[in-house]
Image: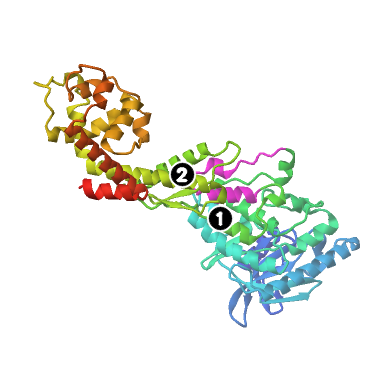
Amino acid sequence: MEAAGERDRRWTSALSRQALLEGTTIEGFQILRPLGEGGFGIVYLAWDPVLERHVALKEYMPSTLAIRGEDFLGVSMRSERHRGTFDAGLKSFLNEARLLARFDHPALLKVLRFWEANGTAYMAMPYYEGPTLKEMLAGEQTAPSQDQLCEWLHPLLDALAVIHRENCLHRDISPDNILLTSAGPVLLDFGAARRVISDMTQSLTAVLKPGFAPIEQYGGAMAQGPWTDIYALAGVVYYAISGQLPPASAGRVVSDSFEPLADTYGGLYSDQFLRTIDASLSLRPEARPQDVAQFRASIDAQPIVAIRPSLTPAEALASEAGAALAASVTAVAAAESPASQPAPTDFAPTGGAVLMAPLPRRTGFRALMLLALVLACGAAWWVGARHGPVQAEASAQVVPAAAAVPEPQSPAVPPRQDVEKLTPVLSNLAPAESSEAAARGSANSGAPSKPVPAVAARPAAPRAKPAVSALQPAETGPRAARANADPVPALAAAGTVQRCSDLVLKSSLDSLSPDELTFQKSQCK
Protein backbone atom coordinates (compact mmCIF):
# COMPACT_ATOMS: atom_id res chain seq x y z
CA MET A 1 0.00 0.00 0.00
CA GLU A 2 1.30 3.48 -0.90
CA ALA A 3 2.45 5.55 2.07
CA ALA A 4 0.41 8.61 2.98
CA GLY A 5 3.42 10.91 2.68
CA GLU A 6 4.20 9.70 -0.81
CA ARG A 7 0.57 10.16 -1.86
CA ASP A 8 0.54 13.74 -0.53
CA ARG A 9 3.82 14.41 -2.27
CA ARG A 10 2.41 13.21 -5.59
CA TRP A 11 -0.73 15.32 -5.06
CA THR A 12 1.43 18.40 -4.41
CA SER A 13 3.42 17.69 -7.54
CA ALA A 14 0.20 17.48 -9.56
CA LEU A 15 -1.03 20.74 -8.08
CA SER A 16 2.09 22.59 -9.07
CA ARG A 17 5.47 21.47 -10.17
CA GLN A 18 6.81 24.73 -8.71
CA ALA A 19 5.55 24.24 -5.12
CA LEU A 20 7.83 23.11 -2.32
CA LEU A 21 7.51 19.52 -1.20
CA GLU A 22 5.90 18.56 2.09
CA GLY A 23 8.36 18.34 4.94
CA THR A 24 10.71 20.93 3.47
CA THR A 25 12.15 23.13 6.22
CA ILE A 26 12.67 26.83 5.56
CA GLU A 27 14.23 28.93 8.37
CA GLY A 28 12.85 26.52 10.98
CA PHE A 29 9.32 26.42 9.47
CA GLN A 30 8.18 23.03 8.23
CA ILE A 31 6.11 23.08 5.04
CA LEU A 32 2.88 21.05 5.37
CA ARG A 33 1.02 21.73 2.12
CA PRO A 34 0.20 24.54 -0.35
CA LEU A 35 -2.79 26.74 0.52
CA GLY A 36 -2.95 28.75 -2.66
CA GLU A 37 -0.98 29.61 -5.75
CA GLY A 38 -0.93 32.69 -7.91
CA GLY A 39 1.03 33.91 -10.85
CA PHE A 40 3.57 35.64 -8.60
CA GLY A 41 3.73 33.57 -5.41
CA ILE A 42 2.74 30.46 -3.50
CA VAL A 43 1.27 30.31 0.02
CA TYR A 44 1.92 27.27 2.23
CA LEU A 45 0.60 25.98 5.50
CA ALA A 46 3.65 25.55 7.74
CA TRP A 47 4.39 24.58 11.30
CA ASP A 48 6.40 26.66 13.76
CA PRO A 49 8.00 24.15 16.18
CA VAL A 50 9.35 26.86 18.46
CA LEU A 51 6.00 28.52 19.24
CA GLU A 52 4.05 25.37 18.36
CA ARG A 53 1.55 27.01 16.04
CA HIS A 54 0.56 26.98 12.42
CA VAL A 55 1.69 29.82 10.19
CA ALA A 56 1.12 30.82 6.60
CA LEU A 57 4.34 31.01 4.64
CA LYS A 58 4.39 32.98 1.39
CA GLU A 59 7.13 32.49 -1.19
CA TYR A 60 7.97 34.90 -4.00
CA MET A 61 7.73 32.73 -7.11
CA PRO A 62 6.71 34.43 -10.39
CA SER A 63 6.01 31.43 -12.57
CA THR A 64 6.47 33.38 -15.81
CA LEU A 65 9.99 34.43 -14.88
CA ALA A 66 11.46 31.64 -12.70
CA ILE A 67 11.45 27.86 -12.22
CA ARG A 68 12.18 25.52 -9.35
CA GLY A 69 15.73 24.12 -9.31
CA GLU A 70 16.66 20.48 -9.47
CA ASP A 71 16.95 20.34 -5.68
CA PHE A 72 13.22 21.32 -5.41
CA LEU A 73 14.27 24.21 -3.22
CA GLY A 74 16.21 26.90 -5.09
CA VAL A 75 14.75 29.29 -7.69
CA SER A 76 16.45 30.06 -11.00
CA MET A 77 15.64 32.22 -14.03
CA ARG A 78 13.92 30.82 -17.07
CA SER A 79 16.08 33.24 -19.03
CA GLU A 80 18.70 35.71 -17.92
CA ARG A 81 16.89 38.44 -19.80
CA HIS A 82 14.23 38.22 -17.05
CA ARG A 83 16.76 38.85 -14.30
CA GLY A 84 16.08 42.61 -14.01
CA THR A 85 12.32 42.13 -13.88
CA PHE A 86 12.65 39.32 -11.33
CA ASP A 87 14.89 41.41 -9.07
CA ALA A 88 12.52 44.40 -9.25
CA GLY A 89 9.62 42.17 -8.22
CA LEU A 90 11.67 40.68 -5.41
CA LYS A 91 12.42 44.13 -4.06
CA SER A 92 8.73 45.05 -4.17
CA PHE A 93 7.86 41.79 -2.37
CA LEU A 94 10.24 42.65 0.48
CA ASN A 95 8.95 46.22 0.69
CA GLU A 96 5.40 44.93 0.98
CA ALA A 97 6.45 42.58 3.78
CA ARG A 98 8.25 45.42 5.54
CA LEU A 99 5.19 47.63 5.24
CA LEU A 100 2.78 44.98 6.53
CA ALA A 101 5.11 44.29 9.47
CA ARG A 102 4.49 47.88 10.62
CA PHE A 103 0.72 47.54 10.51
CA ASP A 104 -1.29 46.06 13.32
CA HIS A 105 -4.86 45.98 12.08
CA PRO A 106 -7.09 42.92 12.46
CA ALA A 107 -8.30 43.19 8.84
CA LEU A 108 -4.77 43.27 7.43
CA LEU A 109 -2.25 40.48 7.19
CA LYS A 110 0.24 40.58 10.04
CA VAL A 111 3.78 39.76 8.93
CA LEU A 112 5.75 37.95 11.65
CA ARG A 113 9.04 37.58 9.77
CA PHE A 114 10.45 38.04 6.27
CA TRP A 115 13.79 37.06 4.78
CA GLU A 116 15.68 36.13 1.60
CA ALA A 117 16.88 32.60 0.86
CA ASN A 118 17.25 30.10 -1.99
CA GLY A 119 17.37 32.84 -4.63
CA THR A 120 13.97 34.25 -3.59
CA ALA A 121 12.18 35.70 -0.53
CA TYR A 122 9.65 34.56 2.09
CA MET A 123 7.32 36.04 4.67
CA ALA A 124 5.71 34.26 7.63
CA MET A 125 2.21 35.32 8.70
CA PRO A 126 -0.42 34.08 11.18
CA TYR A 127 -2.56 31.28 9.84
CA TYR A 128 -6.15 32.39 9.49
CA GLU A 129 -8.86 29.74 9.42
CA GLY A 130 -12.06 30.33 7.53
CA PRO A 131 -13.50 30.35 4.03
CA THR A 132 -12.89 33.05 1.51
CA LEU A 133 -15.78 35.35 0.67
CA LYS A 134 -16.10 33.65 -2.69
CA GLU A 135 -16.47 30.24 -1.06
CA MET A 136 -18.99 31.53 1.47
CA LEU A 137 -21.17 33.18 -1.19
CA ALA A 138 -21.11 30.04 -3.30
CA GLY A 139 -22.66 28.08 -0.44
CA GLU A 140 -25.50 30.55 0.22
CA GLN A 141 -28.89 30.44 -1.47
CA THR A 142 -29.72 34.12 -0.90
CA ALA A 143 -27.74 37.33 -1.08
CA PRO A 144 -26.44 38.76 2.20
CA SER A 145 -28.40 41.57 3.83
CA GLN A 146 -27.25 45.16 3.90
CA ASP A 147 -26.36 44.84 7.59
CA GLN A 148 -24.19 41.82 6.83
CA LEU A 149 -22.48 43.61 3.95
CA CYS A 150 -21.77 46.64 6.13
CA GLU A 151 -20.42 44.33 8.84
CA TRP A 152 -17.83 43.14 6.31
CA LEU A 153 -17.27 46.50 4.64
CA HIS A 154 -16.36 48.61 7.66
CA PRO A 155 -13.33 46.52 8.81
CA LEU A 156 -12.11 46.35 5.20
CA LEU A 157 -12.50 50.11 4.82
CA ASP A 158 -10.53 50.63 8.02
CA ALA A 159 -7.76 48.42 6.65
CA LEU A 160 -7.70 50.30 3.33
CA ALA A 161 -7.54 53.63 5.15
CA VAL A 162 -4.44 52.40 7.02
CA ILE A 163 -2.55 51.34 3.91
CA HIS A 164 -3.67 54.38 1.90
CA ARG A 165 -2.18 56.66 4.54
CA GLU A 166 1.14 54.98 3.79
CA ASN A 167 0.72 55.75 0.06
CA CYS A 168 0.21 52.07 -0.67
CA LEU A 169 -2.58 50.48 -2.72
CA HIS A 170 -3.90 46.94 -2.56
CA ARG A 171 -4.79 46.64 -6.27
CA ASP A 172 -6.06 43.07 -5.96
CA ILE A 173 -9.28 43.18 -3.93
CA SER A 174 -11.61 40.36 -4.94
CA PRO A 175 -13.90 37.81 -3.22
CA ASP A 176 -11.14 35.19 -3.19
CA ASN A 177 -8.72 37.61 -1.53
CA ILE A 178 -11.01 38.31 1.43
CA LEU A 179 -10.85 35.71 4.15
CA LEU A 180 -13.76 35.44 6.59
CA THR A 181 -12.44 34.50 10.01
CA SER A 182 -14.13 34.28 13.40
CA ALA A 183 -12.61 37.69 14.20
CA GLY A 184 -13.81 39.32 10.98
CA PRO A 185 -12.73 39.70 7.35
CA VAL A 186 -9.04 39.87 6.42
CA LEU A 187 -7.51 41.23 3.22
CA LEU A 188 -5.01 38.79 1.72
CA ASP A 189 -2.63 39.18 -1.22
CA PHE A 190 -1.57 42.77 -1.97
CA GLY A 191 -0.19 42.14 -5.41
CA ALA A 192 2.59 44.70 -4.97
CA ALA A 193 5.15 42.51 -6.74
CA ARG A 194 2.63 41.82 -9.48
CA ARG A 195 2.26 45.53 -10.20
CA VAL A 196 6.01 46.12 -10.46
CA ILE A 197 6.55 43.16 -12.71
CA SER A 198 3.63 44.07 -14.93
CA ASP A 199 4.90 47.61 -15.29
CA MET A 200 8.13 46.22 -16.67
CA THR A 201 6.71 43.43 -18.83
CA GLN A 202 3.40 45.03 -19.95
CA SER A 203 1.70 41.70 -19.24
CA LEU A 204 -0.66 42.74 -16.46
CA THR A 205 -3.76 42.30 -18.60
CA ALA A 206 -3.15 38.56 -18.55
CA VAL A 207 -3.44 38.31 -14.75
CA LEU A 208 -6.00 41.01 -13.89
CA LYS A 209 -9.30 39.76 -12.48
CA PRO A 210 -12.07 40.92 -14.81
CA GLY A 211 -14.88 42.74 -13.07
CA PHE A 212 -12.78 43.92 -10.12
CA ALA A 213 -9.94 45.78 -11.89
CA PRO A 214 -10.81 49.38 -12.92
CA ILE A 215 -9.80 50.78 -16.26
CA GLU A 216 -6.74 52.59 -14.90
CA GLN A 217 -5.15 49.26 -13.94
CA TYR A 218 -5.00 48.31 -17.59
CA GLY A 219 -2.32 50.92 -18.14
CA GLY A 220 -2.35 54.24 -19.87
CA ALA A 221 -2.34 57.83 -18.65
CA MET A 222 -4.95 57.41 -15.89
CA ALA A 223 -3.50 57.69 -12.42
CA GLN A 224 -4.20 55.09 -9.77
CA GLY A 225 -5.17 55.98 -6.24
CA PRO A 226 -7.56 55.14 -3.41
CA TRP A 227 -10.41 55.27 -5.96
CA THR A 228 -8.79 52.22 -7.60
CA ASP A 229 -9.27 50.05 -4.51
CA ILE A 230 -12.75 51.53 -3.96
CA TYR A 231 -13.77 50.33 -7.44
CA ALA A 232 -12.60 46.79 -6.64
CA LEU A 233 -14.35 46.77 -3.24
CA ALA A 234 -17.58 48.01 -4.84
CA GLY A 235 -17.21 45.20 -7.37
CA VAL A 236 -17.09 42.73 -4.48
CA VAL A 237 -20.37 44.15 -3.12
CA TYR A 238 -21.92 43.97 -6.60
CA TYR A 239 -20.89 40.32 -6.83
CA ALA A 240 -22.29 39.54 -3.37
CA ILE A 241 -25.68 41.13 -4.18
CA SER A 242 -26.22 39.99 -7.78
CA GLY A 243 -24.19 36.78 -7.79
CA GLN A 244 -22.54 37.93 -11.04
CA LEU A 245 -19.27 39.59 -11.87
CA PRO A 246 -19.48 43.25 -12.81
CA PRO A 247 -18.81 43.87 -16.51
CA ALA A 248 -15.09 44.13 -17.23
CA SER A 249 -14.01 47.76 -17.32
CA ALA A 250 -12.06 47.22 -20.55
CA GLY A 251 -15.22 46.04 -22.29
CA ARG A 252 -17.30 48.86 -20.84
CA VAL A 253 -15.14 51.36 -22.70
CA VAL A 254 -16.52 50.01 -25.99
CA SER A 255 -20.06 49.15 -24.89
CA ASP A 256 -21.11 49.76 -21.32
CA SER A 257 -23.50 46.99 -20.27
CA PHE A 258 -23.37 47.85 -16.57
CA GLU A 259 -26.81 47.64 -14.91
CA PRO A 260 -27.06 49.86 -11.81
CA LEU A 261 -28.01 48.05 -8.64
CA ALA A 262 -30.40 50.87 -7.71
CA ASP A 263 -32.59 49.95 -10.70
CA THR A 264 -32.92 46.26 -9.84
CA TYR A 265 -32.48 45.82 -6.08
CA GLY A 266 -34.12 48.96 -4.72
CA GLY A 267 -36.61 47.07 -2.59
CA LEU A 268 -34.00 44.93 -0.79
CA TYR A 269 -31.38 47.54 0.06
CA SER A 270 -31.47 51.24 0.82
CA ASP A 271 -31.38 53.55 -2.16
CA GLN A 272 -28.40 55.50 -0.78
CA PHE A 273 -26.38 52.32 -0.28
CA LEU A 274 -27.03 51.04 -3.81
CA ARG A 275 -26.35 54.40 -5.43
CA THR A 276 -23.02 54.60 -3.60
CA ILE A 277 -21.98 51.20 -4.95
CA ASP A 278 -23.10 52.21 -8.46
CA ALA A 279 -21.13 55.46 -8.27
CA SER A 280 -18.05 53.60 -7.00
CA LEU A 281 -18.20 51.39 -10.10
CA SER A 282 -18.14 54.37 -12.46
CA LEU A 283 -15.87 53.87 -15.41
CA ARG A 284 -14.17 57.24 -15.01
CA PRO A 285 -12.10 57.59 -11.81
CA GLU A 286 -13.25 61.15 -11.05
CA ALA A 287 -16.88 60.01 -10.84
CA ARG A 288 -16.15 57.65 -7.91
CA PRO A 289 -15.64 58.47 -4.23
CA GLN A 290 -12.08 59.67 -4.08
CA ASP A 291 -11.12 58.09 -0.76
CA VAL A 292 -12.33 55.81 1.97
CA ALA A 293 -13.82 58.67 4.00
CA GLN A 294 -16.11 59.74 1.14
CA PHE A 295 -17.16 56.18 0.44
CA ARG A 296 -17.92 55.46 4.09
CA ALA A 297 -19.84 58.71 4.58
CA SER A 298 -21.94 57.95 1.51
CA ILE A 299 -22.97 54.42 2.44
CA ASP A 300 -23.69 55.45 6.03
CA ALA A 301 -25.70 58.55 5.06
CA GLN A 302 -29.33 58.55 6.16
CA PRO A 303 -32.09 60.59 4.46
CA ILE A 304 -32.97 63.77 6.35
CA VAL A 305 -36.65 64.10 7.14
CA ALA A 306 -37.86 67.51 8.25
CA ILE A 307 -40.22 67.11 11.21
CA ARG A 308 -42.69 69.98 11.54
CA PRO A 309 -44.16 70.39 15.01
CA SER A 310 -47.90 69.85 15.09
CA LEU A 311 -50.08 72.88 15.75
CA THR A 312 -53.24 73.02 17.73
CA PRO A 313 -56.37 74.11 15.81
CA ALA A 314 -56.22 77.53 17.48
CA GLU A 315 -52.55 77.98 16.56
CA ALA A 316 -53.18 76.88 12.99
CA LEU A 317 -56.11 79.29 12.67
CA ALA A 318 -54.05 82.13 14.12
CA SER A 319 -51.19 81.37 11.79
CA GLU A 320 -53.49 81.35 8.75
CA ALA A 321 -55.15 84.58 9.87
CA GLY A 322 -51.78 86.25 10.36
CA ALA A 323 -50.61 85.13 6.95
CA ALA A 324 -53.82 86.36 5.33
CA LEU A 325 -53.59 89.74 7.06
CA ALA A 326 -49.95 90.14 6.06
CA ALA A 327 -50.82 89.28 2.46
CA SER A 328 -53.67 91.82 2.44
CA VAL A 329 -51.52 94.63 3.83
CA THR A 330 -48.72 93.81 1.40
CA ALA A 331 -51.18 93.87 -1.51
CA VAL A 332 -52.56 97.27 -0.46
CA ALA A 333 -49.06 98.68 -0.12
CA ALA A 334 -48.10 97.32 -3.52
CA ALA A 335 -51.19 98.86 -5.10
CA GLU A 336 -50.42 102.29 -3.62
CA SER A 337 -46.74 102.23 -4.61
CA PRO A 338 -45.56 102.98 -8.17
CA ALA A 339 -45.47 100.03 -10.55
CA SER A 340 -41.72 100.30 -11.04
CA GLN A 341 -41.03 100.20 -7.29
CA PRO A 342 -41.08 96.73 -5.71
CA ALA A 343 -43.31 96.43 -2.67
CA PRO A 344 -41.18 95.97 0.46
CA THR A 345 -41.97 93.23 2.90
CA ASP A 346 -43.00 95.30 5.91
CA PHE A 347 -44.95 92.61 7.72
CA ALA A 348 -44.15 89.03 8.54
CA PRO A 349 -46.53 86.56 10.17
CA THR A 350 -45.15 84.94 13.28
CA GLY A 351 -47.41 82.32 14.85
CA GLY A 352 -50.52 84.28 13.97
CA ALA A 353 -49.11 87.68 15.03
CA VAL A 354 -47.92 90.37 12.65
CA LEU A 355 -44.67 92.13 13.39
CA MET A 356 -43.88 95.47 11.79
CA ALA A 357 -40.33 95.85 10.62
CA PRO A 358 -38.63 99.27 10.41
CA LEU A 359 -39.78 101.01 7.27
CA PRO A 360 -37.55 103.02 4.96
CA ARG A 361 -38.09 106.75 4.68
CA ARG A 362 -39.86 106.51 1.33
CA THR A 363 -42.65 104.45 2.88
CA GLY A 364 -43.35 106.89 5.76
CA PHE A 365 -46.42 108.41 4.14
CA ARG A 366 -47.92 104.99 3.48
CA ALA A 367 -47.27 104.00 7.08
CA LEU A 368 -49.09 107.12 8.32
CA MET A 369 -52.01 106.37 6.05
CA LEU A 370 -52.22 102.82 7.36
CA LEU A 371 -51.99 104.07 10.93
CA ALA A 372 -54.80 106.60 10.32
CA LEU A 373 -56.90 103.82 8.78
CA VAL A 374 -56.37 101.63 11.84
CA LEU A 375 -57.30 104.50 14.20
CA ALA A 376 -60.42 105.32 12.15
CA CYS A 377 -61.50 101.68 12.24
CA GLY A 378 -60.97 101.59 15.98
CA ALA A 379 -63.01 104.76 16.51
CA ALA A 380 -65.81 103.49 14.29
CA TRP A 381 -65.87 100.24 16.24
CA TRP A 382 -66.06 102.13 19.55
CA VAL A 383 -68.95 104.33 18.34
CA GLY A 384 -70.69 101.31 16.86
CA ALA A 385 -70.28 99.37 20.10
CA ARG A 386 -71.89 102.26 22.02
CA HIS A 387 -74.73 103.08 19.64
CA GLY A 388 -75.01 99.78 17.80
CA PRO A 389 -78.17 98.52 19.56
CA VAL A 390 -80.03 101.78 18.87
CA GLN A 391 -78.98 101.79 15.23
CA ALA A 392 -79.84 98.13 14.76
CA GLU A 393 -83.29 98.62 16.32
CA ALA A 394 -83.99 101.78 14.29
CA SER A 395 -82.85 100.13 11.08
CA ALA A 396 -85.00 97.12 11.78
CA GLN A 397 -88.05 99.33 12.43
CA VAL A 398 -87.66 101.94 9.70
CA VAL A 399 -85.23 101.21 6.87
CA PRO A 400 -86.08 97.63 5.82
CA ALA A 401 -89.84 98.25 6.11
CA ALA A 402 -89.95 101.86 4.93
CA ALA A 403 -92.66 101.15 2.40
CA ALA A 404 -94.82 99.44 5.03
CA VAL A 405 -94.64 102.11 7.73
CA PRO A 406 -98.23 102.83 8.79
CA GLU A 407 -99.54 106.33 8.42
CA PRO A 408 -99.79 108.19 11.70
CA GLN A 409 -103.27 108.69 13.17
CA SER A 410 -102.68 112.38 13.41
CA PRO A 411 -100.01 114.85 12.48
CA ALA A 412 -99.04 115.05 16.12
CA VAL A 413 -95.38 115.12 17.02
CA PRO A 414 -93.96 111.59 17.59
CA PRO A 415 -93.09 110.60 21.12
CA ARG A 416 -89.63 111.51 22.41
CA GLN A 417 -88.43 107.91 22.65
CA ASP A 418 -89.26 107.31 19.00
CA VAL A 419 -87.36 110.41 17.98
CA GLU A 420 -84.35 109.25 19.97
CA LYS A 421 -84.49 105.87 18.31
CA LEU A 422 -84.70 107.40 14.86
CA THR A 423 -82.04 110.05 15.40
CA PRO A 424 -79.24 108.03 13.69
CA VAL A 425 -81.53 107.37 10.75
CA LEU A 426 -82.32 111.04 10.40
CA SER A 427 -78.63 111.89 10.56
CA ASN A 428 -77.93 109.43 7.77
CA LEU A 429 -80.85 110.56 5.63
CA ALA A 430 -80.41 114.30 6.05
CA PRO A 431 -77.42 114.63 3.66
CA ALA A 432 -79.44 112.79 1.02
CA GLU A 433 -82.08 115.54 0.87
CA SER A 434 -80.00 118.42 -0.39
CA SER A 435 -76.96 120.35 0.66
CA GLU A 436 -79.12 123.46 1.25
CA ALA A 437 -81.52 121.69 3.60
CA ALA A 438 -78.58 120.16 5.48
CA ALA A 439 -77.05 123.59 5.90
CA ARG A 440 -80.29 125.07 7.28
CA GLY A 441 -80.73 122.12 9.60
CA SER A 442 -77.28 122.69 10.99
CA ALA A 443 -77.99 126.40 11.44
CA ASN A 444 -81.19 125.70 13.36
CA SER A 445 -79.64 123.08 15.61
CA GLY A 446 -76.46 125.00 16.20
CA ALA A 447 -74.27 121.99 15.27
CA PRO A 448 -71.56 122.54 12.65
CA SER A 449 -71.91 120.67 9.42
CA LYS A 450 -69.43 117.80 9.53
CA PRO A 451 -69.92 115.29 6.73
CA VAL A 452 -69.03 111.64 7.43
CA PRO A 453 -67.22 110.11 4.44
CA ALA A 454 -69.19 106.85 4.56
CA VAL A 455 -72.56 108.68 4.58
CA ALA A 456 -71.63 111.38 2.04
CA ALA A 457 -70.40 108.79 -0.43
CA ARG A 458 -73.58 106.73 -0.24
CA PRO A 459 -76.20 107.68 -2.94
CA ALA A 460 -79.61 108.94 -1.87
CA ALA A 461 -81.98 106.04 -1.38
CA PRO A 462 -85.52 106.36 -2.76
CA ARG A 463 -86.89 105.02 0.53
CA ALA A 464 -85.53 107.97 2.51
CA LYS A 465 -88.54 110.18 1.77
CA PRO A 466 -91.18 107.79 3.11
CA ALA A 467 -89.16 107.48 6.31
CA VAL A 468 -89.09 111.26 6.78
CA SER A 469 -92.74 111.81 5.74
CA ALA A 470 -93.81 109.28 8.30
CA LEU A 471 -92.34 111.48 11.03
CA GLN A 472 -93.52 114.92 9.78
CA PRO A 473 -96.95 116.44 9.13
CA ALA A 474 -98.40 116.19 5.64
CA GLU A 475 -96.83 118.69 3.32
CA THR A 476 -99.02 121.75 2.68
CA GLY A 477 -96.32 123.81 1.07
CA PRO A 478 -92.81 123.73 -0.21
CA ARG A 479 -90.20 121.88 1.86
CA ALA A 480 -88.10 125.01 2.06
CA ALA A 481 -90.93 126.93 3.80
CA ARG A 482 -91.24 124.30 6.46
CA ALA A 483 -87.45 124.26 6.90
CA ASN A 484 -87.48 128.03 7.67
CA ALA A 485 -90.36 127.65 10.16
CA ASP A 486 -89.80 127.17 13.83
CA PRO A 487 -88.14 123.72 14.36
CA VAL A 488 -90.08 121.04 16.08
CA PRO A 489 -88.83 120.58 19.64
CA ALA A 490 -88.29 116.87 19.10
CA LEU A 491 -86.15 117.55 16.03
CA ALA A 492 -84.13 120.09 17.95
CA ALA A 493 -83.48 117.45 20.56
CA ALA A 494 -82.46 115.03 17.80
CA GLY A 495 -80.01 117.61 16.48
CA THR A 496 -78.53 117.98 19.94
CA VAL A 497 -78.06 114.20 20.18
CA GLN A 498 -76.47 114.13 16.74
CA ARG A 499 -74.06 116.89 17.65
CA CYS A 500 -73.14 115.09 20.84
CA SER A 501 -72.39 111.99 18.78
CA ASP A 502 -70.26 114.07 16.42
CA LEU A 503 -68.35 115.58 19.33
CA VAL A 504 -67.67 112.12 20.77
CA LEU A 505 -66.28 110.96 17.43
CA LYS A 506 -64.25 114.11 17.00
CA SER A 507 -62.81 113.91 20.50
CA SER A 508 -61.53 110.39 19.72
CA LEU A 509 -59.61 111.74 16.71
CA ASP A 510 -58.80 115.38 17.55
CA SER A 511 -59.08 117.99 20.32
CA LEU A 512 -62.30 120.00 20.74
CA SER A 513 -62.62 123.77 20.56
CA PRO A 514 -63.68 125.72 23.69
CA ASP A 515 -67.20 126.21 22.26
CA GLU A 516 -67.51 122.52 21.58
CA LEU A 517 -66.29 121.65 25.05
CA THR A 518 -68.84 124.03 26.57
CA PHE A 519 -71.64 122.53 24.47
CA GLN A 520 -70.59 119.01 25.35
CA LYS A 521 -70.56 119.73 29.08
CA SER A 522 -73.90 121.52 29.06
CA GLN A 523 -75.94 119.52 26.54
CA CYS A 524 -74.38 116.07 26.30
CA LYS A 525 -74.89 113.46 28.98
Q: Is residue 231 above or below residue 412?
A: below
In this view, the mark in front (1 or 2): 2
Q: In this view, does 471 lie above or below 88?
A: above
- Quadrant of res 401: top left
Is residue 258 at least partly visible in the picture? yes
Residue depicted at 39% across the width and 45% down the height: 374
Given residues 246 and 161, the one toward you in this image is: 161
- Quadrant of res 390: top left
Is 349 colored magenta in this rendering? no
* Residue 370, percent from left and from top: 44, 45
* Residue 396, percent from left and from top: 19, 29
> Which residue lies under the disc numbered 2?
369
In the figure, is residue 152 to the left or right of 209? left
Given residues 296 and 98, the one toward you in this image is: 296
The quarter in which the N terminus is drawn is bottom right
Colouring mode (rainbow / by chain / secondary structure / one colour): rainbow
* Residue 506, percent from left and from top: 33, 45
Is residue 141 at least partly visible in the picture? no
Point out the residue furthest to the left here: 409
Q: Which of marks 1 and 2 is nearer the N terminus?
A: 1
Give the class, few, some or many, for how many residues have Cα within 10 Å of label 1's Cα (few <14, many ≥20). some
Q: Please, what is the three-letter code of the amino acid marked with disc 1?
A: Ile
Point out the residue furthest to the top here: 476
* Residue 211, percent from left and from top: 67, 48
In the figure, is residue 441 to the left or right of 352? left
Residue stretch in magenta = 255-281
> Which residue lies under the disc numbered 1?
299
Given residues 174 and 119, the one toward you in this image is: 174
SS of the residue under disc 2: helix
Q: Please, what is the three-letter code of the amino acid marked with disc 2?
A: Met
SS of the residue under disc 1: helix
Residue depicted at 32% across the width and 23% down the height: 460
